[in-house]
Amino acid sequence: MKKFSLFIGLCILFTGFCIFPSNAQELPTNFLVMEEFVSPSDMQNFTKAQDKALELMKNYPTQFTFWTYRTDENSLYWVLPFEKFASLDVMFADMNGLRQKMLEDGFDPDKEFRNLSTMRHTLIHWSQDLSFHPTGKLGQSKENPYCEWTFAYLKAGHEQEAAEAIKKYQEFYTKNDQVYEWDVYQVIFGHDMPCWILMTRSESELALRKTEAELSEKYMQEFQKMWQNFAQHVRKFENRKGWFIPRWSMNWEME
């Protein structure tokens, strides 16, 4: 089974577990992240194939959720929420069923996506306790499509100390009545663990830099102290920029 068929199958696998009531007040906490790597020379063909595939998917009686992002490193994040796992038998049955519907509509995923990309998978958990949303606005929105992720690879056994360091940031922003929102995701299955992912969103990169510059001008000394307190528990940092793609996302708006 080819890569794209696997993607479709994984989407369908979570069909029964990614649907949330329209009046839900809480976001899901567990996510399957599929990072898909596309070379620049293949991006045009990949985009055409992906547009066709997702347009077809909208016509089928399936309801599942995923958010899609493109990054500054020629990759895509497909982020699927889940509550629990189903059996492999259900996964492959649903995968084959959707693939068959596409074939009947004249779209062959294996042929369309041949040699266009590679993929790796990670499972992450959203830490509500370590995230910070004083405005109460959670989740992804069209108004804040620009995203940045900091991958903090912790020193073994330093999770508690790192959590306490992040809570110092929360206390500081609350005390000074400053709005700077973030999410923390903990990798529960992936490579190079333990790893936490700190995610921030904004309307643009320029807007985020402006906000950070204004805060730094006022609180540089305090920030340096808090950063050193957190950084001593991390052995490596990696930073990545990205942008939310609403047209490649499905059922992503949460109440």
Image (cartoon, rainbow, N blue to C red):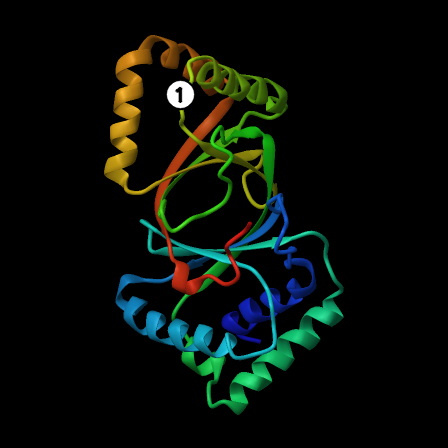
Q: Residue 61, image x and y in percent?
A: 61, 77
Q: Quadrant of the N terminus?
A: bottom right
Q: Is residue 223 above or below residue 249?
A: above
Left or right of 74, for residue 158: right
For the point 29% across and 18% down, the residue is 216
- Say what secondary structure mark 1 lies in: loop
Q: Is residue 192 above or below residue 252?
A: above
Q: Residue 243, image x and y in percent?
A: 35, 50
- Corner quadrant of residue 121: bottom right
Q: Residue furthest front?
A: 23
For the point 35% across and 71% down, the residue is 46
Judging depth in this view, the residue of 4 and 52 nearest the camera is: 52
Q: Amino acid at mark 1?
A: Gln
Judging depth in this view, the residue of 181 and 106 nearest the camera is: 181
Q: Residue 188, image x and y in percent?
A: 63, 42
Judging depth in this view, the residue of 131 and 5 nearest the camera is: 131
Q: Is residue 235 above or below residue 42?
A: above
In the picture of the structure, the residue carrying the numbered disc 1 is 178
For the point 46% across and 33% down, the residue is 182
Badge 1: few (under 14), some or many (20 or more) residues near its Cα, within 10 Å? Answer: few
For the point 30% across and 34% down, the residue is 208
Left or right of 143, for residue 198: right
Left or right of 250, for residue 224: left
Q: Residue 85, image x and y in percent?
A: 72, 57
